[in-house]
Structures are given as structure tokens and as C-alpha cells.
Amino acid sequence: MANKRKTILVIDDSSTIRSIVADMLSKNGFQTLEAETVEVVFTDMERMHFDLAVIDIFMPGIGGIEGIAKIKERWPNIKIIAISAGVEGMDKNKALRAATIQGADRALAKPFTEEDMMAAVNELLEVQEPAEG
């Protein structure tokens, strides 16, 4: 019996980061959606289903911290992984702590490895590795 493929929304203002993360997820069997801003999620993604969001903390507009709160308010069961490299004036670890306070389920500092991302995704979505044999 095949499991329904989970869909992950990647929100980052950097097209490079969005592509890298989406490629990681796709090659590990997930469907992906991409958004450049949190605002896009509430206009274009409103009718789409996703199981988890990977969201950058520092972006133009609403930004990740407020975005996490808005996503959790609109879709309380969505799991969220916050990602950040920090910005001038704010350490990435402080930003990631703020994200978890707002409702992020996991926080990863950039740069992160594919293994780190997949471990977080699989844990949050309770994905079982296929049995050998």
C-alpha cells in the first residue's frame, strides 16, 4: 500500500535557497510548493494543501517570525521548520529561538545539511523509513 506523498511548502525570499531545499525534499520523495514571501502563502496558497512549511526568518514584508504565527493561526496543525542565517544586528540562534516561541516546531541554522533537514522533516511528519529486505 503506497503512502500519500506529503507536501512541503518552502518559503524563502532567496530563489537559490528555495531551489536547494525543494530539491532536497523532492529527491527524498516529497512534493514541494514554493513561495517567495509569506504574503504569497495567504493569496496564492490559500486553496492548496501542505503538510509542513519550511520558512526563512528574515524576509521582506511580513517576515518569518510573524509569518509563523499567522500560518499557525490559519492552519494550526501545520508543522513548521524555521531556517535562518541571521542578519546584521541579530544572531541566527536568537532569531531561531524567537521562531520556536512563535510556534515553529523545529529550527535549523543555515547552512544546514540535507541530513539535518530530512531528520527534522521525517520526525515532524512521522515518516517511516522503508524496511530493508
Image (spheres, rainbow, N blue to C red):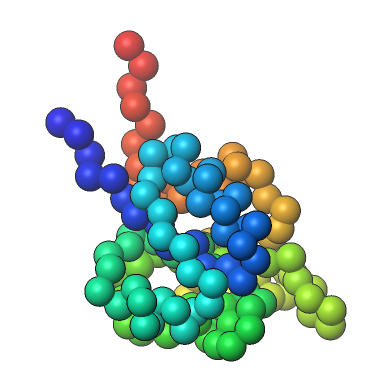
Q: Where is residue 58 in the image (x, y as percent from the top left)?
A: 66, 77
Residue sitting nearer the eye, 97 or 14: 14
Write the residue at 59% across / 40% down. 115
The quadrant of the rendering that contains the N terminus is: top left
The residue lying furthest to the right in this view is 88
Give the quadrant of residue 116. top right
Vertical comparison of 88 with 123: above or below? below
Q: Where is residue 12 in the image (x, y as percent from the top left)?
A: 58, 68
Number of numbered labels in the structure image: 0
Q: Position of residue 47 (x, y in %)?
A: 25, 74
In the picture, measured across the screen, residue 7 lies left or right of residue 12, that is left
Vertical comparison of 90 with 117: above or below? below
Vertical comparison of 72 with 113: above or below? below
Write the residue at 34% across / 73% down. 45
Write the residue at 33% across / 60% down. 51
Q: Where is residue 104 in the image (x, y as percent from the top left)?
A: 50, 70
